[in-house]
Amino acid sequence: MPSFSEHDLVYEDGSKTLHYLSAGPDNGDLMIFMHGWPGIGKTWHDQLTEFSKRGFKVVAPDMPGYGGSTARKVATDYAQEQITKAMLALLKHLGYNQAIWVAHDWGCGTLWTLARTHPEVFKGACGMTVPYGVLELGLEEALKHVDRNVYPEDQYKYGQWSYQAYYEQNFEKATEWFDKDPRGFLRAAFTKGNPAAVGKPAPMSRAVEDGGWMGGIERPIPASAIPDEYACIDKETFEELVAAMEKTGFWPGDAWYINHKANRAYNLENTKNDARLKFPVLFIEAKYDTVCETVNSTLATPMKELCEDLTYVSIAAGHFVPVEKHEEVNQAMAEWLEAKVRG
């Protein structure tokens, strides 16, 4: 695995630190990669390697609450208004006015908040699994797109988003559960997509009713219970991720889920251009993702209506598509960059 230079940006008058990895030529077009829950900048190493070789300046922060970045137990630190401040500070610190912003999962909450409120900092946007026009507007927006054929309302009040409602209702209990065995949980999370799961209720769709994840069991299943062939992440990155999550605990990362109302208010109050995105957008759909399900639901409809230059790619993978199918993801991104962005 190639080496990346590691850096710390101190911002917010010295009160916060953002740790980031960097590679590629200093004069290259800038690509900033924002990981989701749970993650670290290193989870993008396949993309950082590929695009630094292609002449881009690539940067991947440990997002606020993770890894080497500030991870205080202050819930408001993880509202999108604060997270986007960190990303804008990073852009300025790197000496650029614009970037190609790339994101997965909760990183897309930040990507789309930035796109909606600061469109001027975009050369292009690439989002994976979480489409524009939903998550940045809070849980109430996501609930509008639940596929009630799969999730009848009398059985699945919150559809596939039950786990997010569970965070809001039982935050400390939810967080303590992950911290009982970070390795076991991460091993279970970073597994390959299963085509047989498509069209069936997601595993977390009864978290509220079950009183927790995995049917409400007392702690995550042990890592040893999951065979190697199910893993979708390389061992070295996995070990770094486990160490990072053991260091910070899950509280800061989980707190991204308890700012829905603040995120909605901030986005709606600061929307530019009637929420229309005029710069090139690439969306990478994970076909076997049962939570961020965009194949049969209306979850991606707002994005299709609001993006003026949208490229839509579907990849046969589970939720962690950038690690599971990194070659296909990199190819889709390279083709889009060549066709839509670099010129």
Image: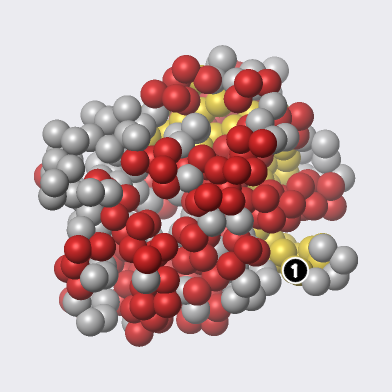
- In which quadrant of the rendered image does the C terminus lie? top right
State the residue in front, 204 or 196. Answer: 204
What residue is at 30 percent from the left and 76 percent from the top?
184
The answer to whether any part of residue 165 appears in the image is yes
Q: Where is residue 261 in the image (x, y as percent from the top left)?
A: 53, 50
Q: How many labels does the image show?
A: 1
Locate residue 147 relative to residue 37 in the image: left or right: left
Q: Residue furthest bottom?
A: 180
Locate residue 288 relative to residue 274 in the image: left or right: left
Q: How is the image coloured?
A: secondary structure
Q: Label 1 is placed on what type of residue?
A: Thr
What residue is at 23 percent from the left and 49 percent from the top?
157
Specify the quadrant of the image occupied by residue 4: bottom right
The answer to whether any part of residue 104 appears in the image is no
Judge whether 335 appears above or below 164 on screen.
above
State the residue in front, 52 or 106. Answer: 106
What residue is at 58 percent from the left and 51 percent from the top?
262
What kind of element bears circle 1? strand
Q: Position of residue 90 (x, y in %)?
A: 77, 52
State the residue in front, 232 or 134. Answer: 134
Q: Position of residue 93 (x, y in %)?
A: 84, 52
Judge whether 159 appears above or below 148 on screen.
below
**Residue that label 1 marks:** 17
Locate residue 23 relative to residue 46 in the image: left or right: right
Instruction: Categorize mark 1 by other alpha carbons within 10 Å: few (<14), some (14-19), many (20+).
Output: some
